[in-house]
């Protein structure tokens, strides 16, 4: 069960496909607009209401996009999530009634755990971000900086409690429906922690090592690569463009919306041309576009096939796109927009596969072009990216989840 944008859903098609191959029957429970993502994976689908793109394009979503600070974005996201949580409940309960075990993403953890408790089902967390408090870094959704060990951990607890409070009203109503005693958000989280509720994290320990102060049951498993089909291919017109010249640079902001896509698109193209590079521009939810013989605009294409043919990738540093770039072994220029993207951008810089992160606000060609030149012309970035990609190829993120699942099914 998961909710959010495409990046919050796609990795679970790969995890689900791997669990199907291990002999399990798997259903992905998420927004109906993502039904096509499970095509050919062997994973079933159960639709939840709410179209995340429509929400982001609503007046409420546009206010979130216009927020100038991380704190402002979090406040508006909390308001949006609180108003939508109750609409997801019926679909989650219906899907759970025909299930044996629930695997819950961080975006639905408190609500999903209540469903599992009410129906007497075992469950585990499957998180795409390191959400548990730690002294080693501040909460990824809040900042890319460290505030020091004591404040980092305290802030982690505060963010986790805030997430519980987002779902508090929906959880209270659901507990009453399912005949459960009333429990406050703090007590609910404390019960999960005392029980060492298992949580697997779908990223590589080579990218974010498991914090040494995490409790038992919090494991870093490795990436869950999206299922792109048995033989994913690029559109013929895109293949022709790639074959017609040197490797281009991919530019995409995923599900992020931007206030003036025309202006930003023009700056991106100007930067690419100033750096002497061709470009593949992904429209995304922001509506980016480019014209000219040296530019190619695409919609949704499998990153697993496209990124290895790029000279570098410019992206919003969402967890999924960050992973895809690392898997391809190409340098990055992260442009983090909001929430945990700053954290992943900082990891790319620390790993030596990106020359630095750029702010999307007022992004100008004069800043982007030099970063593109460094990422594509200095061989150290590609060398480190390829070495990291080689390590990722040796990891298996699905097996640890399958082993925990077997223990939950046969205690």
Image (tube, rainbow, N blue to C red):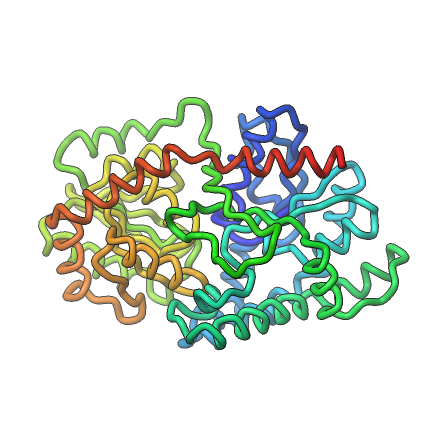
**Residue 338 sits in quarter:** bottom left
**Residue 157 sits in quarter:** bottom right
Q: Residue at x 77, y 51 (%)?
A: 115
Residue 331: horizontal and vertical position, in percent?
A: 23, 47
User: Which of the two residues, 118 or 275, is positioned nearer the viewer here?
Assistant: 118
Residue 202: horizontal and vertical position, in percent?
A: 50, 45
Q: Residue at x 53, y 35 (%)?
A: 398
Decide if residue 36 is in sight here: no
For residue 181, side relative to residue 232 (left or right): right
User: Which of the two residues, 171 or 407, is positioned nearer the viewer here?
Assistant: 407
Exactly how many numbered labels are in the figure?
0
User: Which of the two residues, 280 or 359, is positioned nearer the viewer here?
Assistant: 359
Q: Residue at x 70, y 43 (%)?
A: 102
**Residue 98 sits in quarter:** top right
Residue 19: horizontal and vertical position, in percent?
A: 59, 30
For residue 335, side relative to residue 41 (left or right): left
For residue 330, side relative to residue 67 (left or right): left
Residue 343: horizontal and vertical position, in percent?
A: 40, 62
Decide if residue 285 is in sight here: yes
The quarter of the rendered structure image containing the C terminus is top right
For residue 395, side relative to residue 43 (left or right): left
Q: Residue at x 74, y 35 (%)?
A: 409
User: Which of the two residues, 326 or 155, is positioned nearer the viewer here?
Assistant: 155
């Amino acid at each position: 069960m998961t909710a959010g944008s495409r990046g919050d859903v796609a990795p679970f098609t790969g995890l689900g496909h791997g669990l199907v191959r291990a002999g399990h029957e798997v259903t992905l429970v998420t927004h109906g607009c993502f039904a096509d993502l499970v095509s050919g994976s062997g994973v079933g689908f159960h639709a939840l209401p709410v179209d995340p793109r429509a929400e982001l394009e609503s007046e409420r979503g546009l206010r979130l996009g216009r927020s100038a600070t991380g704190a402002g974005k979090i406040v508006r996201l909390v308001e949006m999530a609180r108003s939508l949580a109750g609409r997801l409940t019926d679909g989650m309960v219906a899907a759970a009634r025909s299930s044996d075990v629930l695997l819950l993403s961080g975006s639905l953890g408190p609500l999903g755990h209540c469903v599992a408790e009410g129906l007497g089902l075992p469950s585990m967390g499957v998180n795409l971000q390191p959400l548990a408090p730690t002294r080693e870094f501040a909460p990824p959704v809040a900042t890319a900086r460290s505030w020091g060990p004591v404040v980092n951990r305290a802030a982690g607890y505060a963010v986790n409690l805030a997430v519980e409070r987002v779902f508090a009203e929906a959880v209270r109503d659901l507990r009453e429906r399912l005949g459960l005693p009333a429990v406050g958000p703090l007590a609910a989280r404390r019960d999960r922690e005392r029980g060492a509720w298992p949580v697997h994290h779908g990223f590589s320990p080579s990218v974010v090592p498991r914090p040494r102060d995490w409790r038992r049951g919090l494991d870093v498993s490795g990436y869950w690569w999206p299922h792109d089909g048995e033989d994913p291919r690029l559109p013929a017109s895109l293949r022709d463009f790639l074959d017609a010249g040197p490797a281009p640079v991919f530019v995409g902001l995923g599900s992020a919306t931007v206030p003036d896509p025309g202006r930003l698109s023009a700056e991106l193209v100007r930067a690419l041309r100033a750096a002497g590079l061709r470009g593949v521009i992904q429209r995304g939810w922001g509506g980016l576009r480019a014209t000219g013989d040296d530019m190619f605009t695409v919609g949704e294409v499998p990153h697993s096939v496209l990124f290895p043919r790029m000279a570098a990738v410019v992206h919003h540093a969402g967890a999924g796109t960050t992973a895809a770039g690392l898997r391809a072994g190409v340098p990055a220029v992260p442009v983090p927009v909001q929430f945990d993207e700053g954290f992943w951008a900082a990891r790319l810089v620390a790993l030596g596969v990106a020359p630095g992160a750029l702010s999307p606000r007022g992004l100008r060609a004069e800043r982007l072009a030099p970063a593109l030149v460094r990422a594509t012309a200095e061989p150290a970035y590609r060398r480190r990216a390829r070495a990291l990609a080689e390590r990722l190829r040796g990891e298996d993120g699905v097996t640890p989840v399958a082993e925990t699942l077997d223990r939950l099914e046969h205690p």
